[in-house]
Image: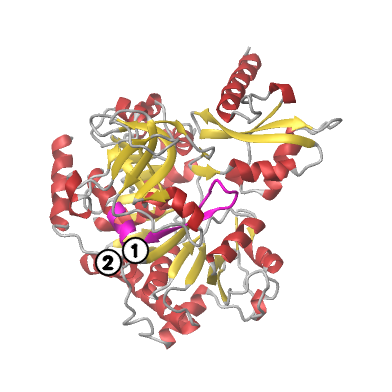
Amino acid sequence: MSNSLARRRERLEQLFPVWTERSLGDWLTFCAEKYAIRPLVITDDRTITYAEADAWATRLADGLVALGVEPGEHVGILMANYAEFVPIKFAVARAGAVAVPMNFLNREEELKYILRQSECRVLITMTGFAGLDYLQMLDSIAFGWDRDESSPELPLLRNVVLLSTDGRTREDVCTVVDLEELGRENSGASAGIEIDPRSIGDILYTSGTTGSPKGVMIPHDASQRTGYASALTRAFEDGRRILFSLPCYHMFGYVEGLIAAMVVGGAVILQPKFDAGEYLRGIEAHRATDILCVPTMTVGILEHPDVKKYDLSSLKAVLSGAAPGPAWLWDKVAAELGATEIVTGYGMTECGGAMTLTLPEDSYEVTATTVGQAKWAGVAGLPERGGALTEYRTVDPLDGRFLPDGEEGELVSRGPTNMLGFWKNPEETAKGLRENWVFSGDLGRVLPNGYIEITGRSKELYKSGGELVMPKEIEELLSAHPGISQVYAIGLRDDRWGEIGCACVIRAPGSTITEDEVIGICKENLARFKVPRVVWFLEPGDLPTTPTGKIQKFRLVQQATQNLISERTEQNA
């Protein structure tokens, strides 16, 4: 297998003997010129070629300019993995605007905060998805939006463009179809707009330690370098087909799926939401060669009762990242799914996405115990690092002092895909980006061979199902309930989910609040991935504290883990 992988990498390096910085709109044009009649987007309903996507994106860009979008303005995109996402995303770039892709599972208050903080002038949104009604949300947070009335909550929002996902529209409100027709009527409106490839292409919101999401400013060129580095490191063959339901508002689906596939004239097989059976059916129906997962999804696919009924012979590769996976998982993937090129990785939005990957030729032990090495990027990477995409080191978490190689500390990285900072948040930018080094908040060590081990988190954030969760948000919500005296949200290690949320609750005197009630409050107010899966009730004297009375969350994690293990042992006895 190694010789075959080496030949693929040689071909990829020959495709890009010199790295050219491009805007995202120009990247689509570049790929469309090379792979015009090949499929780029595949869904059950339609197939879109590179040439068709390029022309569609141009019409939509012309429509955005005709709508009044100016270069540098921000356009929100609230959309699941529908075919329209791809041309819309490139259209925003081609119009010279900055895309603000949003988590479509956000609830009303979360959506309002991001729309306001990001200063979106235009929002392109689905009408509804997964039980969420975005029209109703807009009615609540920006009354009059559908009648061109300015809202005090969102004073900068001028236009909303609707993608009807449930048959609904609003009278006199522009739809995606209308936007395309407006582009036809104003053909060439976006022509001649010049975009600096090093300027902001995207603002992606990620959870922060201050209680509010932070808008990470990613330059146009960064996404392309990261996508190319993935294709090179994973040794993509020509025309790779990648199936995934991981949302394109996230760097995982967007870069590891869409941008990486474009490098080799491949296609993305988009699914709006995860369903293990749909993954299996999609692999068979569309001859997928690669799938993107987080470990909980991988487990779900393997445990599906019909896994052996599908023809999975096309599947060769799996990227299962965003959380650690046990060794048995990779053995089972190879045995049950027939995929032999199995990799995992690690990264942050602030760095430009996944920065490290294991190699498809690595042993499963390496895949289970490390997150790989810095991606290979050839001429698109760091020349002084042998073409690596980024450089990793560790620093002392307290004073930021660089540590010797191999010593555990906070992981920091630098490279050409670093963020430009956090949108309108200089304080957090100063904390997270220092002298061109991105500070991860994760503890780990860089091994002599360049591979990285993650050993913990210096921050309190945790990932559940691949999504970053901010404990403070949960704590503030629950502590407002009169039946709760104190609450601490923590992440507990879980083989299926990576980590699961646990709310450690001290009841108020006389309170009888139950686990179901606590979880119910969270379900009503938070996106699903933020809802704790476990509630642990304890007494004030049970809290681990420092001599000065500060809660030691790392000890709370240890105690809660032991408590959960004990409960499960009793249940299984």
Q: Mark 2 or mark 1, which has the lower sequence index? A: 2
The label shown at residue 400 is: none
466 horizontally vs 532: left or right: left
Residue in view at x 45 percent, y 31 percent: 456
* Residue 217 shown in magenta: yes
Depicted 200 relative to depicted 13: above or below: below
Depicted 478 relative to depicted 74: above or below: above
Q: Are marks 2 and 1 in contact (CB under 8 Å)?
A: yes
The label shown at residue 220 is: 1
436 horizontally vs 564: left or right: left
* Residue 64 shown in magenta: no
Work out which quarter of the rendered image holds the N terminus and state it: top left
Residue in view at x 38 percent, y 28 percent: 332
Query: Which residue occupies the extreme right position in the image?
Result: 510
Q: Quadrant of residue 258?
A: bottom left
Q: Describe the element under mark 1 as helix, strand or loop.
A: helix
Q: How many marks?
A: 2
Amino acid found under the numbered disc labelled 1: His
Amino acid found under the numbered disc labelled 2: Arg
Residue in view at x 50 percent, y 73 percent: 176
| Residue 11 image point, x, y percent | 14, 51
- Magenta-drawn segment: 205-227
Q: Can residue 147 be seen in this view?
A: yes
Depicted 365 relative to depicted 55: above or below: above
The label shown at residue 22 is: 2
Instruction: Work out whether residue 304 or residue 361 is closer to the camera in this orientation and state it.
Output: 361
